[in-house]
Amino acid sequence: MLANLSIKNYALIDHLDVSFSKGFTVITGETGAGKSILLGGLSLVLGKRADLNSLRNKDSKCIIEAEFQIENYGLSPFFKKHDLDYEAHTIIRREILPSGKSRAFVNDSPVTLDVLTKLGGRLIDVHSQHQTLRLTETDFQLKLIDALADNGKVLLDYQNQLETYRATERELQELIEFQKEADKEHDYNSFLLQELEAASLKEGMQETLESQYEQLNNVGVILEQLSQGHQLLINEQAGVLGALSELKQVANKLSTFGSRFEQLNERIQSVFIELDDIASEFETLQEGTDANPEMLEQLNGKLQLLYDLQRKHDVNEVSELLKIMETLSGKVNVTESLEARIEEKRTLLKIQKDQLEKTANDLRARREKAIPGLQKQMLSNLSNLGMASASFKIGLSPADVFMNNGKDDLTFLFSANKGTEFGALKKVASGGELSRIMLTIKSILAKYEQLPTMMFDEIDTGVSGEISNKMGDIMQAMSSAMQVFSITHIPQVASKGDQHFKVYKSEKGGTTQTYMQALTIDERVVELAEMLDGKTLSDSALAHARQLLN
């Protein structure tokens, strides 16, 4: 329930701080006194968009704070989902800065306007003329039927199934669209992949081929240098090995004269062995190096193929070509497996659709069962509100498409008088009739749902006398299970309140301000008398007011 409301620097309100109790609270005041301003301020903490023009003092910020007792609202999951601190006594604060920016807080944690709107909808149901028009919407009418049919769990199952079904539908469509595009590229991708596969690409192959090509392409120079090197080592007259052989004999003789000479001899012996081995390697390389024009041509072809592929794919390394080949392989494989995946998705969609159809039929059957009881309750309540001849025709039929609330087409027709044709509510019901029908619906919903605080904004407009008295009785009865507010001009309704506030304007310091005052019993008598007979209080008006309160 709404426990306290504080408004600072908003429209004609300088500072207002008021506490509310549970039960039935009525708010009265002359036209233009500021009742709509009060409701406008409250709507800001419920998520309405802020307007800089609503600041009373343009140089100061507007602060609106509402305190709620929410222990019976089952809102813990909501607070957890949005990472908010859950408190049974929750405070919502909205600030509008002179710059035009606005901030919102729940228990001192900043929240977005979207989160605030969702939370506000769970805390207060503000009934205004705009919401009365919702009565003519199919979604609202189905919500009423579902409440009586206790369809909460079935509807939740249906909506979860519908979400899954629509997700599968999107996935199937995406696969089909992807297949269309993939088919266009499949042949080209396959050609590119085959071209790369034919090149037998391997890491490091380019370096190997280029090295082999360089050797074969320069075989004459290589043989000439090998021969020259071999001769430098083994030439009998001037060869390195011949001179080193003589040096080896000298060192061998010296080795007998001490360890230092012995070490020198070992080093020379080691050099001789190494050079002898090098001479053998030169000879072996000479014998193994031959001109091979055919092999040279093959190597040139392989290298040219590599270079062509690199230019074609705008890369410089074989490793990059291998990555491209892997990507192409994936595309080709995906394209070739798409048909099977699409068929699997179609099969899954058929299973989900059958289950969804079954749940939708269950919803419809439960709704059809609840409709007679709804009609009976509505007609009974409307009869008490002066609409004894009112009648409804409510029917369901299967729709062609799945909707968020089922697969039903609803006809909700109304006739206010016997002998008149039935028609859609928005076409045949007057404003006063719509208000009474809406009040009836809210009172029925209160029996089946845990409704939040209900605030009726002049729902009794256009009615008077005994009818308004009955409307007050209905709101008073609703307040036994929930907190109910009524902003009213009707004394019969105002007299039913457990708590009565008066909204009024007064000039102070050359400016007009709106105030809100909780009335005592005596003040209520005066207020009701003025509502009955104007500012000139007569004894009969005062007596009538006391009678209403009693």
Image (cartoon, rainbow, N blue to C red):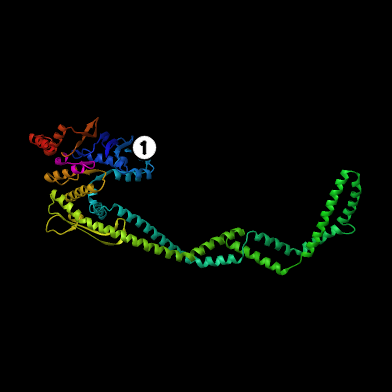
- The image quarter in which residue 245 lies: bottom right
Residue 499 visible in the snapshot: yes
Where the N terminus falls, by quadrant? top left
Q: Nearer the viewer, residue 213 or 323?
A: 323
From the viewer's perspective, is residue 113 above or below residue 324? above
Q: Position of residue 50 (x, y in %)?
A: 32, 42
**Would you say residue 487 sits in the magenta stretch?**
yes
- The image quarter in which residue 458 lies: top left
Amino acid type at mark 1: Asp
Toward the top, the furthest residue is 509
- The image quarter in which residue 494 lies: top left
Give the residue pinned by disc 1.
108
Q: Nearer the viewer, residue 303 or 169?
A: 169
Q: Nearer the viewer, residue 456 or 507?
A: 456
Toward the bottom, the furthest residue is 294
From the viewer's perspective, is residue 494 above or below residue 204? above
- In the image, taking residue 330 as reference, residue 77 lies left or right, namely left
Where the C terminus falls, by quadrant? top left
**Would you say residue 546 sits in the magenta stretch?**
no
From the viewer's perspective, is residue 59 above or below residue 345? above
How many residues crowd mark 1 within 10 Å: few (<14), some (14–19), many (20+)?
few
Magenta region = 476-494
Q: Position of residue 231 (x, y in %)?
A: 85, 60
Residue 385 visible in the snapshot: no
Toward the left, the furthest residue is 540
* x 73%, y 68%: residue: 292
- In the image, taking residue 510 as reference, residue 236 lies left or right, namely right
Q: Position of residue 307 (x, y in %)?
A: 63, 63
* x 18%, y 51%: residue: 377
Q: Position of residue 282 (x, y in %)?
A: 80, 60
Q: Secondary structure at mark 1?
A: loop
- In the image, taking residue 542 as reference, residue 324 lies left or right, namely right
